[in-house]
Image (tube, rainbow, N blue to C red):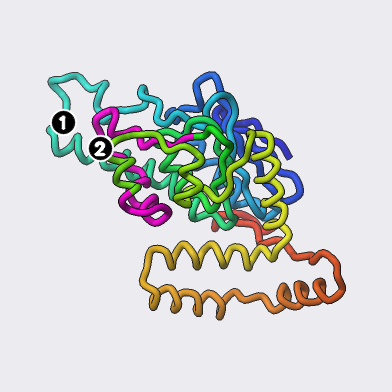
Amino acid sequence: MSNSKYKCFDLNVVENIANLVFSRPDELNTMSRDFWVELGEVLEEINRNSDIRVVVMSSTGKHFCAGMDLSAFSNGVDNIPDDKKPDSARIGEAVYRVAKELQGYISDLEKIRVPVIVAIHGGCIGGAVDLVTACDIRVASKGAFFCIQEINIGMAADVGTLQRLPKIIPDSKMREMAYTGRRMYAEEAKETGLISEMYESQKEMLEGANKLAKEIASKSPVAIYGLKAVMNYSRDHSVTDGLEYNALWSGAMLSQKDMTEAITANVEKRDASFSDLVGVKKFNESDS
């Protein structure tokens, strides 16, 4: 299934793997206003499709993503005449709502039911770092680099990097990057744990990412969803709270059917076959 209804993304689903590709190479795949809104829309589409068991996110052109499109920066009142503009408190409230909206689109990567593998080439800059830190697995090609660009334009990153990156790489290294805006290249990213694998070329990287996706897609989808939910919850809570959540999840959604199939397939030396998750529908949508 191929989907080109988006301006900023191409979505292609084959054999339970969704390849989500940034499709504006001439604009360095900057995060325009359309990019942000479409990110939320395409992730909702992915989450609703029970045929999808894993996502491979990649890009086109010179850079993975050059970060926020500067023309998208706004306090929400730019077009209001000066004599009618609200006071600073109301402007601040509008800016707060915009930040929360963008944070929500990034957080959707963690909320969807399937893992997201992101394959990075070229520059991963500014808001793109916020985005990749919300993905489950990061791989990169040699020559790729990461840059917390916001400090270089006089602001602090505000849609996820400062919250997620310290839980991926050492805090001191993250602070160095945030304070200086320097580039971290793939070799260093591999050493610090920001990426799990580095490939010689973009072609090899995409092949490797899809090979990994195929392996993940072969597992029980309800168990994979459980792993993602429990690992994300445990990352943000105490060990005690994480164990409690883990026990509750197992009590509610441990599939004896899938366990039996996995064990039987292993004994019979064949590939296991698992049913899809139930498709996500809005409350007023028909089950037919």
| Magenta stretch holds residue 159 | yes
In three-dimensional space, the C-alpha distance between marks 2 and 1, rounded to whole angstroms, equals 10 Å
Secondary structure at numbered mark 1 = loop
Secondary structure at numbered mark 2 = helix
Tag 1: Cα neighbours inside 10 Å, few (<14), some, or many (≥20)? Answer: few
Q: Amino acid at mark 1?
A: Pro
Residue 106 position in % (x across, y down): 44, 45
Q: Which residue is mark 2?
A: 94
Residue 237 position in % (x across, y down): 37, 68
Mark 2 in CB contact with mark 1 (< 8 angstroms): yes
Q: Which residue is mark 1?
A: 86
Q: Amino acid at mark 2?
A: Ala
For the point 32% across and 28% down, which residue is it?
73
Residue 52 position in % (x across, y down): 67, 51
Which callout, 2 or 1, points at the residue further toward the start of the chain? Answer: 1
Looking at this view, is 233 or 267 the one in front?
267
- Which label lies toward us, 2 or 1? 2
For the point 23% across and 22% down, which residue is it?
80
Magenta range: 145-172
| Magenta stretch holds residue 147 | yes
Image quadrant for the C terminus? bottom right
